[in-house]
């Protein structure tokens, strides 16, 4: 059944998929590393799209046919059809300002770490034959865990 997205539903999905990613990582099986990383990147996608629905509330009820401007069509496409984290994050200036105002993670601003995760993950990872290892997966999940605290709030 198709339904419109909501920010609360996306946050719930993000929490559940992060749990799935952690479960895969905790197997310590290198064959599960790619799956853990893919799910962790999907967590970030869900959280960014949840924020899109907060910053652009009209997206929650918008039908594609009712969109009047190129900007509206672009935002709708990013929310409902596309998976490019960099592009989604670029459309969320309020999020960047908010997360950076909450502090720094070590020597880096949260928005810088988020940009790194966005650059590292792609929806196409689900088709990749590259094999990550559990160490890589653990490091990626740790970045996502830190970011969740900033984005999810």
Image (tube, helix red, strand yellow):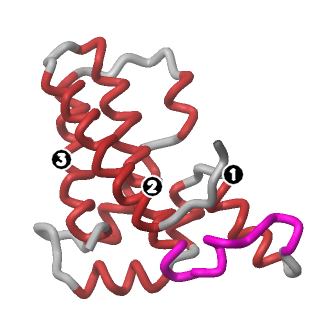
Is the residue 119 above or below the residue 68 in the image?
Answer: above
Residue, disc 3: 142
- Image x and y of residue 139, in percent: 19, 40
Q: What is the span of residues highlighted in magenta in the rendered image?
A: 53-66
Residue, disc 1: 81
Callout 3 secondary element: helix
CB-based contact (under 8 Å), mark 3 and mark 1: no
Q: Nearer the viewer, residue 70 or 128?
A: 70
The span from disc 2 to disc 1 (Cα, nearest Å) is 13 Å
In-image side of 99 versus 68 (left or right): left
- Asked if residue 62 lies in the magenta stretch, the reply is yes
Residue shown at 52% from the left, 22% from the top: 128
Residue shown at 29% from the left, 78% from the top: 99
The span from disc 3 to disc 2 (Cα, nearest Å) is 17 Å
- Image x and y of residue 27, in percent: 15, 18
Residue shown at 45% from the left, 43% from the top: 121
Residue, disc 2: 46
Quarter of the image containing the N terminus? top right
In-image side of 81 versus 63 (left or right): left
CB-based contact (under 8 Å), mark 2 and mark 1: no
- Image x and y of residue 36, in percent: 30, 30
Residue shown at 25% from the left, 87% from the top: 101
Give whichever of discs 3 and 1 has the lower sequence position: 1
In-image side of 104 versus 45 (left or right): left
Q: Nearer the viewer, residue 83 or 58?
A: 58
Callout 2 secondary element: helix
The rendered magenta stretch, by its main secondary structure, is classed as: helix
The span from disc 3 to disc 1 (Cα, nearest Å) is 27 Å
């Amino acid at each position: 059944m198709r339904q419109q997205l909501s920010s609360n539903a996306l946050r719930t999905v993000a929490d559940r998929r992060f749990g799935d990613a952690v479960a895969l990582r905790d197997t310590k099986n290198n064959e599960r590393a790619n799956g853990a990383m893919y799910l962790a990147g999907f967590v970030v996608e869900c959280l960014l799209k949840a924020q899109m629905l907060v910053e652009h509330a009209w997206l929650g009820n918008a039908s594609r046919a009712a969109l009047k401007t190129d900007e509206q069509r672009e935002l709708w496409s990013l929310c409902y059809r596309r998976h490019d984290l960099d592009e989604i994050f670029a459309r969320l200036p309020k999020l960047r300002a908010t997360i950076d105002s909450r502090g720094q993670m070590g020597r880096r601003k949260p928005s810088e770490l988020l940009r790194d995760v966005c650059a590292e993950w792609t929806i196409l990872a689900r088709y990749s034959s590259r094999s990550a290892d559990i160490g890589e997966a653990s490091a990626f999940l740790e970045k996502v865990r830190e970011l969740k605290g900033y984005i999810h709030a």
